[in-house]
Image: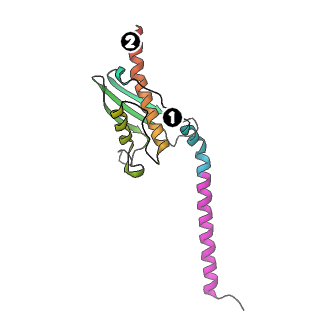
Amino acid sequence: MGTSKAGRKKVKIRFVLLVILGVAALGTVLGLLADSPGRRELRELTIGNIDFTGLQDGTYTGEYNGSKGDSRNAAVEVTISGGKISNIKILKGALDSNGNPAELTGGMTVDDLFRQVLQSESLQVDTVSGATLTSKAHLKALENAFKQAQKEIMEEALE
């Protein structure tokens, strides 16, 4: 006795579903492996200390460009007025399709992270839980912008 048409159809459907799931799983694994060096680079990235009292007025752009991958590259623009940080704008990184800060995990955005920096006047703040690597990339970009503000002060002092 042979298998009924309905039985063969169920077997084909199950086979197709298994193939689709297998391809999806393989794609996920390959994606994680391809991103692994960049993730490791960000995990090991250190964020330096900045003297917030020595920032010169102006607008500064800071970037973080990973050498092992560019999926989490970030750029920010910092405006300092009267010796205080008056604005931080994300130019590249965790932005949505409208150019607004993208919602990360728990409804947080990188702007929330930057608010912590401003309140504590330190880059040594807690990263957004579940978005640690994205947070670190943006903090490094912010650090690089602040270094420019400090560098100009140091150059003027040497003149």
**Comes first in the chain, label 1 or label 2:** 1
In the image, what residue type sits under mark 2? Answer: Glu
The residue depicted at 40 percent of the width and 51 percent of the height is 106
- Residue tagged 1: 65
Query: In the rendering, at what x and y percent does residue 39 appear?
Result: 56, 42
Q: Residue 156, labelled with which disc? A: 2
In depth, the one of 13 and 105 nearer the eye is 105
On whether residue 2 falls in the magenta region, the answer is yes
Label 1 sits on a secondary structure element that is: loop
Question: Quick one: which residue is furthest to the right in this view?
Answer: 1
Question: Quick one: which residue is furthest to the top in this view?
Answer: 159
The residue depicted at 36 percent of the width and 25 percent of the height is 52
Q: Quadrant of the N terminus?
A: bottom right
Query: In the rendering, at what x and y percent does residue 44 appear?
Result: 56, 36
Q: Quadrant of the C terminus?
A: top left
In magenta, the rendered stretch is 1-30
In depth, the one of 103 and 91 nearer the eye is 103
